[in-house]
Amino acid sequence: MKARIRKIATFVEETVTEMGRTINPPTRRAAAVAVIENPLAGKYVEDLSELIAIGEELGELLTQRAVAALGILGPSAESYGKAAAVGENGELEHAAAILHPKMGTPVRRVLGKGAALIPSSKKRGGLGAVLDIPLGHKDAAYVRSHFDGMEVRINDAPRANEIMVALAVTDSGRPLARVGGLTKDQIKGEDGLR
Amino acid sequence: MPEVQVRKRFLAVEEIFHEGGPIAPTPLRRAAALVVIRNPFAGSYVEKIDAFMDDLKPLGLEMALSLVKALGNNVKSIEGYGKGAIVGSAGELEHGALWHVPGGYAMREVLGGAKAIVASTKKVGGPGTRLDVPITHINASYVRSHFDAMEVGITDAPRADEILLALVMTTGARVHARVGGLKASEIKGEDGLR
């Protein structure tokens, strides 16, 4: 393991009713979050390859944790998203190095597929920073029922020299989705968009 | 009796490897089970509410069992516990007190007769309110290494007419516990205190 992990948190949320209506089957989503040391904190470093490698290993670890927390097999996941919060001694680019160059491949390997872009968000912040992880369908970004977001927060992270990295997966879209658009049964799954 | 109407279930698990000191041989694990229910007494003063405690018993058991499962499915590994409630704005603090009996007894039952009182907290609050659920050793309240707390909350709960119920369990002491006091190895286990 290249990352020095302080803690891993998982969150699972299941919605069974909404506005008095039963959601059947319940919508379920999970996020796995790792709090790691930022090896580049406190100084400007041109080469971010150390963080890029960490992103690759966290992609696999966090996807496995999130899928296990949901209790499903990877290919049953429907939507996904990722996010990172960099502690105050790091820079936003450190989050970009973890999230963008190499994290996606292992995520897609665990989930079997994933033609769509993995939606992402990032920020710099202090302890208790709230991450809103954007969610989109993993095979077709335009599936409207699956546009969503999941909020995660860890009260003691990220410390100044840490980065908090989050990966979310669902086995469903929004509860009571009814604003039209592309539906999941219409997915062609060729270009990652439709 | 009012039926227990669940809107959402939420499970948070933390695995803590270190906090700046030596990496723990066995990581500390903490888990919180949260359930959002409709508050049957919201919006008016109801004198007689205590029968609802019985209605909550099955939910308490379900939540306690989900915590044991999330922490590795071994009852013997559970060493700390706590409970709490957040009452939505159309309810009163006393509605949160309904959780003391069903929440506490459910965990004791699942853990096979834990002796210590279950530490607890509660408040009235809006959606996204955070609650610091206190944690103590399951058999002896004075075990200093196991005094802990876990912050919990759900972005969209409790709504005004809801109650967010929480149970928490842990697998051990704080990760770098070293402030003395009664040790878990010194528990007499007679009075639930020492």
Image (tube, rainbow, N blue to C red):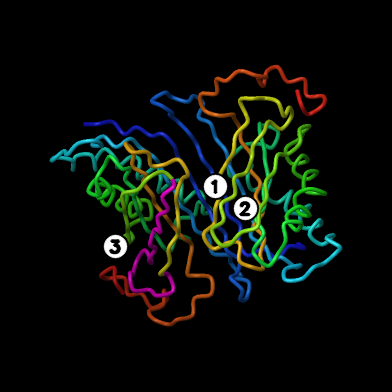
Which residue occupies 55% across, 45% down? A151
The residue identified by callout 2 is: A33
Q: Chain of mark 3?
A: B
Side (left or right) of A50 relative to B160: right
What's the magenta region? B128-146
Under mark 1, the amino acid is: Phe
Q: Badges 1 and 2: C-beta atoms under 8 Å apart?
A: yes
Residue B22: image x %, image y %?
Answer: 62, 76
Under mark 2, the amino acid is: Val
Is residue A77 something that shows in the picture? no
Q: Is residue A150 above or below residue B108?
A: above
Q: Earlier in the sequence, mark 1 or mark 2?
A: 1
Real-space Cα separation, disc 1 to disc 2, in angstroms: 8 Å
The residue identified by callout 3 is: B117
SS assignment at label 2: strand
Which residue occupies 51% across, 54% down? B71
Q: Quadrant of residue B194?
A: bottom left
Is residue A127 something that shows in the picture? yes
Q: Which mark is residue A11?
A: 1
Q: Chain of mark 1?
A: A
